Amino acid sequence: MPKLLSHPFTFAFTSSTHSNHSKPSIFLLSSFIGFFDIKLGVTIISLLALLNKVAGIYGVLAVFTGVSLAQLSMYIYSILTIGLVIYGLQATGEENARKTFIYANSLLVDHLLSTVYTVWFGLSWYFDNPHDGRRIAHGDAQKNMMNPDAPELSPELRKQAAQAIWKAERDFATMILVSLWILKLYFIFVVYSFAIHLGRGTYTSLPLSKPPSTIQTNQRRLQSNLNQSQSGNDSNEIEHHLLLPISETHLYHHHNTSLTLDELDSNLV
């Protein structure tokens, strides 16, 4: 059986096997930021991703005020991937290991593509932009926003003022970009950990995890345990390995060795 540390800050998950060759330990998260159920964490991550994708709809409106082709393609990409986040929310609610793992893979690919866009825009902003204070309008709307009464500076003074502002903002902007990039990697790791815990049947054993709240979830776990026990285990072994919020006294009323899913399911009502 898997061995889990009971503290909510546990990050290490160790699996043991009855075979002669022991599998290496896989480090998984057991909670979200150490305080919340990991499933709740995946839901929060998905909602934040959905908010970010929906923002792409408003970004497309920038085409009327002047926008580069690269920016427009990023906004369109965000809109097209809204369905992917909705798919992830459904998989999380169903506690479907396979779908959640697919969702985690898609988030990783999305992060890689977002990194390409970030590097592209970063190189352009940090190195191609002269930061000399010249006001460049990309459309009529931006021209109308410019203050015609602003004091005129000589090109040299304007460049010095712009460079001073840029030096003050450059390091802070870099720190924000790197922090968000690392944070998204953590989010992806949370989703992967949740998917693997679901696949191994260890999610309900985590310190901060809530017990199954629906009959459907219990039925899936019952069916999984019954399938694993068809290789010669008797009914007592089945009762011992079931990870369900059912009192043991209810299960031990069944003395038949041919214990069926319908019989066990009747105890859930």
Image (spheres, rainbow, N blue to C red):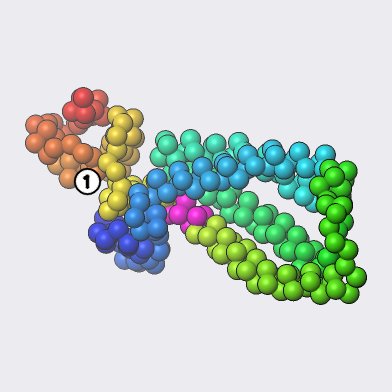
Residue 17: x, y in percent?
31, 60
Q: Is residue 25 above or below residue 41?
A: below
* Circle 1 Cα neighbour tier, 10 Å, few/some/many (<14 / 14–19 / ≥20): few
Image point (33%, 34%), residue name:
217
Q: Which residue is mark 1?
A: 241
The quarter of the picture where the N terminus appears is bottom left
Note whether residue 111 is visible.
Answer: yes
Q: Secondary structure at mark 1?
A: helix
- Res. 65 image quadrant: top right
- Res. 80 image quadrant: top right
Residue 159: x, y in percent?
84, 72
Out of 215 and 7, give the one closest to the viewer.
Answer: 7
Q: Main secondary structure of the magenta part?
A: helix
Image point (51%, 55%), residue name:
188
Total labels drawn: 1
Relative placement, left or right, of 122 versus 157 is left
Q: Please tell me whether residue 189 belongs to the stretch shown in magenta.
A: yes
Note whether residue 98 is visible.
Answer: no
Q: Tell me where the magenta segment starts and ends, as one range.
A: 187-193
User: What's the residue type where badge 1 is placed?
Assistant: His
- Res. 31 image quadrant: bottom left
Out of 226 and 233, give the one closest to the viewer.
Answer: 226
Residue 170: x, y in percent?
69, 70
Image point (75%, 40%), residue name:
60
The quarter of the picture where the C terminus appears is top left
